[in-house]
Image (cartoon, rainbow, N blue to C red):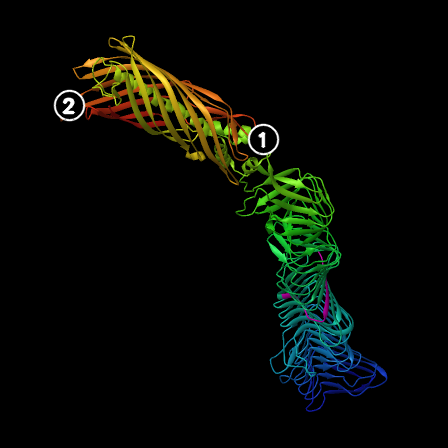
Amino acid sequence: MSGNDTLTVDSAGALATGDEKAVTLSDPSAISITTAAGSTISGDDDGIHASSTTDGSGTISIVNDGTIHSTGGQSIDLDDVSASGVTTTITNGATGQLISDNADGIRPGNNATVINNGLISASGATGESHDGIDFQQYSGTVINKSGGVITGERHGITSSTNVDVTNEAGGTIIGRNGSGVGSDGTGTVVNYGTIIGSYDGSGPGDGDGVDIDGDFSVTNYGTISAQGAAGYDKTGQLNVSEGVALTGSGTLTNEASGVITSTQVGVTLCCNAGTQSFINYGSVYGADVGFRSTQSTVTLTNYGQISSDRFGIDNIANSGLASVLLIDNYGSISGAADALFLENGTTTVLTVHPGSEINGAISLTGSLTVDADTAYTLSGALSGTGDFTKTGNGTLVLAGDASGYSGAVTVSAGALESTASGFGSGAITDNASLVLAQKQDGTLTNTVSGTGSLLKTGSGDLTLTAENTYSGDTTVEAGTLTVSGSVAQSAVSVENGATLTGTGTTGATSVQAGGTLNTAVSGVGTQFHVNGNLGLQSGSDYVAAVGTSGNASQTVVSGALNIGQSTLIADSAAGAVLTKDSQYTLITAAGGISGAFSSFQSNLINPYYFLSPTLAYSTDSVSLLMARNSRSYASAAVTRNEYGVGSALDTMSGSSVINAIEGLDERGARHAYNALSGEIHASARTNLIQDAFYIRNAALDRLQTADCVSGVSYSTVKTSDLAGHSTAGCDNRGAALWGTAYGAWGRNGGGGNAGATHHATGGFIIGADTMAFETWRIGGLVSYGHTSFDTGAVNSSGHSDDVSVGGYAGTHWGHIHFKLGAFYSWDMLSAVRTAAIAGYRDRLSSSYPGGTAQSFGDLSYRFHVGKTAEVEPFANVAYVNVHTNHYRENGGAAALEGRAMDTGTTYSTFGVRGGASFRLGGITLTPNASLGYRHTYGLVTPTTHEAFRSGSSDFEAAGALLARDAAVLNAGMSTRLTDRVDVGLSYIGQYGRNYTDSGLRGKVTLKF
């Protein structure tokens, strides 16, 4: 056909050839071919073929409702129609079929428009390059109507120059071993239906949904699917199955209903120096990559979903063009391995919006800038070595694991928030705000520089170890900030409930009400430095650790220290005991100190009773030392003596004794008071009073022996007449001489006040008496005695040498006997004691005289029992007065002086005496005994009035107790060995509460 020809094939028509073309067009100017439903045009070569038309103009119209089928060529081949003035329109009706068994389905030629409602199909051997529509080197337009199917053994639609495709809803375009729509040049695709690029598994293949190598405009409302690829293309590049692959400049829009899927990469924008844009409202999925940008500057605006089983988005750098990806995300980007995979050499800017999602990790070896104008959280892990930059006025939270990230972090605007481990290990440049939200303890080892601020939140402990140089403010809002490195260029504010600690350096620091600066956490001997001023505001706390020997944690301030109504808390190191003479420097301030701490608290182990931890201020330091507290020395006392000494010490100025006592605990102070009391002087008076008993007891016994009413003698006292002959029994005929020796030992309790005193006494007595006034016997005596005593509890001892004289008398009226006597002793006392206190020891000695005066009266009634025994109830009253002179101890600061004193004591004794005589083997034995109850009247606690020689008020010291009530026992035996020698021995016992005394009295009388 040529010129203006028309060909119509009706429904019953059939046009068939063998090896030739069924219809050939030459030089068409107005050609029209119409085939009705049911008609057939077929041939072994092209079904319809046009010969070369390189110039001129004209129209070609082919309307097919039947079947045009070629077994060896194209069903329609207008490839030789190259004239730009020829317009070709191919319309394939709903019943139309354009089928090629072994070539392209149709080749529309230049300036052709294909409108398909039916089937356009190219088949052939597996791997052949047979396309459904192949525009070859020409541009063309395809409108695939609802129900229309375009399918090729390789591509569905392809052109090497330009193709414009509209695939309406219900339309299908399939490339069975290539692209659904492909152009080596430019192209425009509007898809409402389905576009599929597949791979049949035979050798190399690249199944892309839409593949346009030049400038493009792609809009998808339907489904674009890439279903496989293998091998390498003709340039040696690996074939990758991509739902949409675009190389030139242009815009890809995936509308809300649009679905783009791939077994490998959902969308790729590549390799262009111009501008590429992808606007996604719908769904994009790639099994390997959801969206890929490489060697281009790409703008991605996402309102929909981009997802992958590996990488949601990757930005790939190859040699050549830069790879810049600008992501404006309102939707969801997800990747099972990484939401974002950003290679080295790429630049990515991610703008996030409220409600958008980045689901998955970020692998960063390129550079990533995240722009957040509102609060936003990236929950995925961050890894790689690339640079991370935060822009925008909002707060971006990095909530994922960043242990595998070592790139540099820059905060250019707004705030970047994470934990100490959430920024990775690289350097941080903070030119806005860095937020450390530390709910658990963590350590930031990264170096932080820049002009921005740092905010610490969360209840955990954040430790900064690096030498940071950022110059913005540091705010500790909650938890603890530990600075072991430096933030010396940053002013630090510690807010209510927060704590600052460490061994590093901060800039000027202000601790607000409720905040704490705690150097105790770092331990004794550490230093915390403040490069500037330190302000401890009202209501703040400062905590320091205190150890031993002046060691403490310390804050060193290069500027001034300003103390408001702040509290200082001293925390004792484990096992540390404060020492008395140590000073603990807690804060130094080169710029001086103003104000003072309003309160002081501590859990210090304070072993001292009279010293308490006290703060001391100098012009440039605050120190802790042990200073005298308000407790009086008397307040430590429990007993009478302790209180007396303590009260005296309260009146003394400093001395070595005072210094030693200040360093004692309460128990030690009481021990010291007892050591200082000089109670041995009072106990000496106790012993002098008690020892007087032996003088009057000897006189009483002599009178009892000399009273010969019964003729029974039961005394150990023996007499002789003046001629030197010993008398038998008793001698009441005239004057007589007698003598006795005694020895005793015992203990007096202190009654809980003084220490118990042990004593030993011994001596001898010589007397003479005679009868007078018929029934009276009157005599006198002289004696010498020595008494030693010691109080071990207070390291004290002493002795007394006593010389006594006196007289006695006795008479009787029938069975009634009366005896009396009076004596005086000159006592020479010596005492030695050691005042031993922790840190002080003093040996003290003294010697001074005293005197003991006593008298007694004894009334008894004697009963005779048979011829050889007598029993005599008695009543006895005695009075003893001890006088000691003023004394002054020799020694150091603990030496005492005591004033002269008298102590009077009255005794009453009620009891019974008895005696008998009998012979045993030719020897006359005379046993005797007495038992009495003695009561002491008045005070039973001898005292002294003393004062420290170095200057104090007087105090009273009490000694060992006299027995208030005591049992007195005498029991003895005497015998005559010859007419010149008599011997006797008796036991004397005195027993009372807190008092025992046992003695022996013996006599050997030699008569001349």
Mark 1 / mark 2, whichever is N-terminal: 1
Q: Is residue 345 magenta?
A: yes
Determine the residue located farthest toward the bottom in the rendered image: 19
User: Which residue is denoted by mark 1 in the rendering?
Assistant: 652
Separation of residues labelled 1 and 2 (CA atoms): 72 Å
Residue nearer the viewer, 996 or 806? 806
- Classed neighbour count for the residue bearing mark 1: other residues with Cα under 10 Å, few (<14), some (14–19), many (≥20): some
Where is residue 186 shown, x and y percent of the image? 77, 76
Amino acid type at circle 1 is Met
Q: Tell me if residue 576 comes above or below residue 934 in the rendering.
A: below
- Classed neighbour count for the residue bearing mark 2: other residues with Cα under 10 Å, few (<14), some (14–19), many (≥20): few
Where is residue 340 shown, x and y percent of the image? 66, 66
If the image is split into quadrants, where does the C terminus sit?
top left
Q: Residue at x 31, y 26 (%)?
A: 741
If the image is split into quadrants, where does the N terminus sit?
bottom right
Q: Quadrant of residue 924?
A: top left
Residue bounds of the magenta highlight? 338-353
